[in-house]
Image (spheres, helix red, strand yellow):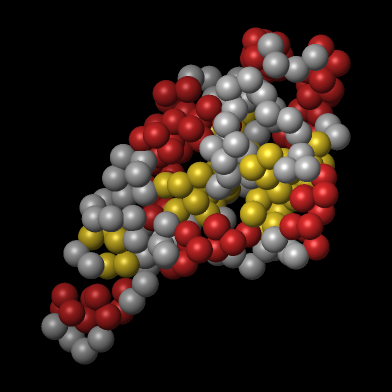
């Protein structure tokens, strides 16, 4: 997918834009992580924010790619240094978004994708970075959500039941989001979110020196 031409910070013809934070949230099992990976794989202008966590790696996860795996002491040190944009505790494990790499990417005109829950999305809005564009992903049915959670075969039965119980509370925050996508089909959901990203990249308030660009095109003074 392209943002309309040129490298990441450009819309085309030398017109620069600022980096945009994009947030994906959903109940566990609704598909946000799979969708996020598909978006990253198909869009060279989008980079993934890699969260830190105190939980152990799951099978197939790689440090630095999926998460920055930290001890509790390491996590506390970063908290003390105000090094997280957002953080939360989920089912006994702690998660946080490192501040420095995100701020550097946005300042360079790169778009950053976040895979966080509604609490993380709320904290990101209050973190001082550019206001994020937020998308909430819903499962098509409760039955399908439970099927997806059990199909992962990575969590004990008690954890799956706890995630199902938490899903209704998470979905109650849908009004805090800019966009809603019902994930009936992975390919279709990815296409919808790609269209959202493309449109947001062309919003006026994300474009830098637009007055100067128009002045050059029109022949008027910038």
Residue at screen point 30% across, 79% down: 211
Residue at screen point 82% across, 20% down: 159
**Quarter of the image where the N terminus is located:** top left
Task: Report whether 145 appears left or right of 193.
Answer: right
Q: How many marks?
A: 0
Q: Is residue 182 visible?
A: no
Examine the image and state in which quarter residue 61 appears.
Answer: top right
Residue 53 location, x and y as percent?
72, 41
Examine the image and state in which quarter residue 168 appears.
Answer: top right
Residue 130 location, x and y as percent?
55, 64
Judge whether 167 appears above or below 151 on screen.
Answer: below
Nearest to the observer: residue 74 or residue 6: 74
Residue at screen point 75% across, 65% down: 81
**Quarter of the image where the C terminus is located:** bottom left
Nearest to the observer: residue 151 or residue 200: 151
Query: Can you name the residue that lies furthest to the left here?
Result: 219
Residue at screen point 21% across, 89% down: 221
Task: Report whether 221 appears left or right of 73.
Answer: left
């Amino acid at each position: 997918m392209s943002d309309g031409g040129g490298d990441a910070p450009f819309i085309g013809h030398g017109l620069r834009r600022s980096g945009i934070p994009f947030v994906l949230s959903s109940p566990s099992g609704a598909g946000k992580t799979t969708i996020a990976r598909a978006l990253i794989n198909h869009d060279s202008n989008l980079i993934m924010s890699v969260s830190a966590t105190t939980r152990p790696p799951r099978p197939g996860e790689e440090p630095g790619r999926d998460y920055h795996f930290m001890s509790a002491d390491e996590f506390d040190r970063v908290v003390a240094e105000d090094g997280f944009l957002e953080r939360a505790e989920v089912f006994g494990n702690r998660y946080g978004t490192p501040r420095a790499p995100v701020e550097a990417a946005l300042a360079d005109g790169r778009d950053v994708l976040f895979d966080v829950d509604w609490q993380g999305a709320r904290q990101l809005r209050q973190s001082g970075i550019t206001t994020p564009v937020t998308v909430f992903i819903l499962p098509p049915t409760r039955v399908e959500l439970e099927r997806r959670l059990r199909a992962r075969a990575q969590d004990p039965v008690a954890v799956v039941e706890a995630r199902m119980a938490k899903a209704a509370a998470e979905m109650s925050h849908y009004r805090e989001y800019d966009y809603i996508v019902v994930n009936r089909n992975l390919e279709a959901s990815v296409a919808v979110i790609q269209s959202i990203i493309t449109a947001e990249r062309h919003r006026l308030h994300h474009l830098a020196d637009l007055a100067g660009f128009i002045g050059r095109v029109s022949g008027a003074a910038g």
